[in-house]
Amino acid sequence: MANRTETQAERGHRTIHAGGEWLAASSGATRDILDPADAQPFAVVAEGDEKDTDRAVAAARRAFDAGEWPHAPVAERAALLRRVADLLVRDREELGLLESRDAGKTVEEGRVDIDCVADAFRYFADLVAGEALGRVVDAGSPDIHSVVVHEPVGVCAMITPWNYPLLQASWKIAPALAAGNTFVIKPSEITPLTTIALIDLLVEAGLPTGVANIVTGPGHTVGARLAEHPDVDLVSFTGGLVSGTKVAQAAAVTVKKVALELGGKNPNVVFADACETEEGFDTAVDQALNAAFIHSGQVCSAGGRLIIEESVRERFVAELARRAARIRLGRGTEEGVECGPLVSEQQRARTEDYVASALAEGAVVRCGGKRPEPSPERPESGYFYEPTVLDQCHREMRVVREEVFGPVLTVETFRTEDEAVALANDTEYGLAGAVWTADAGRARRVAGRLRHGTVWINDFHPYLPQAEWGGFGKSGVGRELGPAGLAEYRESKHVYQNLAPKPVRWFAG
Ligand code: NAD
């Protein structure tokens, strides 16, 4: 670990990795990486552009077309992924801290992220290692041997967001490598540090030169070039709807495979029967807080829409607001802090704008709704915002329809099960949602009717590497994790072998 930290310090702003070399931006441009807790720079990276992107794509192309990785035995690829998981465990503290500092999350969240990243590498290693190499198809004759095999897609471009920088990268890199692809990744320009560190770990684990490439830089240059590049075969994007749409449009010109993991506006539906016992009430309130405010709400699956049965609303919201007001805000790296700052000034301004629009449309603030008082653990220069509960909301409000991506929970109410389902499905997104009820039949009924890619019953937020993650509607195209998450990075090929060829005599001559 010490060696790697030294290497990074020595490397300075040479953070572009192409064809096995660490490079500065060809323009010489750099970018300061800010700590969102105090807005102070704490690292410098290369600000790459289209030229740097072309160089990285060329390296990935060479490694795919002429290198050994796409043809490496499955056991070898799986072993490499497992070595990466071991290295992540070795560097857990350092990487967890780096993620916390870069993205503003608490150190504990940073550590959990690294555990989840290691799990993703292990899962895809096990998945490919345990697979049959092909599927034999019955062609109706003993003279025909017909088999469907999987091959890597080729050069994969990956574009990732700032909220779970390394986790989102791992959901792409692990299956892409398991399938035998080469790649170029562009992390978010504001949180690139752990993805740079992961490239070091891949090299340390023995990945051949040119297989893993990274270009640090902005979306409108590096990201846009990756999406349109003729030598890229697949683009996998995680981020917002606006950028995702641009990526899909650019990729269409060269008919690339496209995977999009976009936003969400996720309902948390609470029936009164879930709150009948004290324990049930406490759990539902606690999990509603977690759903909305973990990582200050900057989570694609954040449960930012509480949809609660009218009869229990007042008691539930009062308790929720009481507990939300007590969440300890501060620098994520401080022990005991429960919520860090937002990732950037822009993200806080966006949150403030949504709260202002909600108030103008009739919402009532039950807690938060402003920046906190500065304190030694919450410098005034940091991008802090109080966990906010907005009561009296309805589906016509912008704050209810659009993704806030900040610590804002809106409250809507229902009287019947049909009304609850209609509200929960009344979104252009469809990433995730939850239903809380003590009635098992209702739980299954409602879960079956929700148009969201993940549905939790009496829980919120857990995901499993073995289970597909992705969205209905405008939450995206394709799936990450699970067998479908590996299939994204593969082409299927049907090999039909005639063991006793004869003329077909279709043509007389
Ligand atoms: P963003 O769309 O602004 O940026 C995402 C990435 O796209 C960044 O690397 C950015 O540089 C790049 N980018 C921007 N414009 C581009 C362009 N024209 N062409 C190519 N690349 C471009 O999103 P963000 O603000 O970084 O992240 C927040 C969003 O990500 C939220 O909407 C959130 O819901 C979503 N998200 C979704 C999931 C999921 O699994 N569905 C997970 C995490 C985040």
Image (cartoon, rainbow, N blue to C red):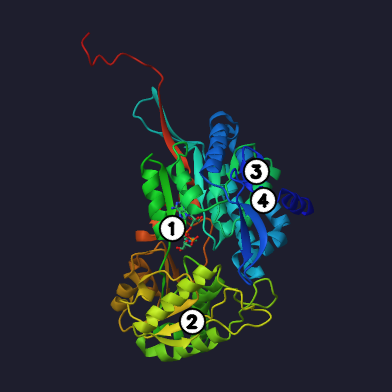
Going from the N terminus, do you reach mark 3 or mark 1 first?
3
Which of 293/26 is in front?
26
**Cα distance in 3D space between marks 2 and 4:** 38 Å
Q: Which residue is mark 1?
A: 470
Direction from residue 377 to residue 59 in the image, left or right: left
Quadrant containing the C terminus is top left
Which label belongs to residue 23? 3
- Note whether 327 is above or below 73 in the view shown: below
Amino acid type at mark 3: Leu
Q: Residues within 10 Å of mark 1 (few under 14, many from 20)?
A: many
Instruction: State the residue position of label 4.
Output: 13
Residue, far right: 2
Dot 3 or dot 4, earlier in sequence: 4
Would residue 35 be seen by someone viewing this image from the given angle?
A: yes
- Looking at the image, residue 292 sits to the left or right of residue 504; the answer is right
Q: Residues within 10 Å of mark 3 (few under 14, many from 20)?
A: some
Percent of width and height locating residue 355: 43, 79
In front: mark 3 or mark 1? 3
Residue type pointed to by label 4: His
In the image shown, does 219 or 29 lie closer to the viewer?
29
- What secondary structure is marked by label 4? loop
Between the residue at mark 1 and the residue at mark 2, the CA separation in whole angstroms equals 27 Å
Q: Is residue 27 above or below residue 270?
A: above
Judged from the image, the secondary structure of the residue bearing numbered disc 1 is: loop
The amino acid at mark 1 is Gly
Please give the label number shown on residue 88.
none
Q: Residue type at mark 2?
A: Thr
Q: What is the quadrant of residue 73 in the picture?
A: top right
Q: CA distance from mark 4 to mark 1?
A: 34 Å
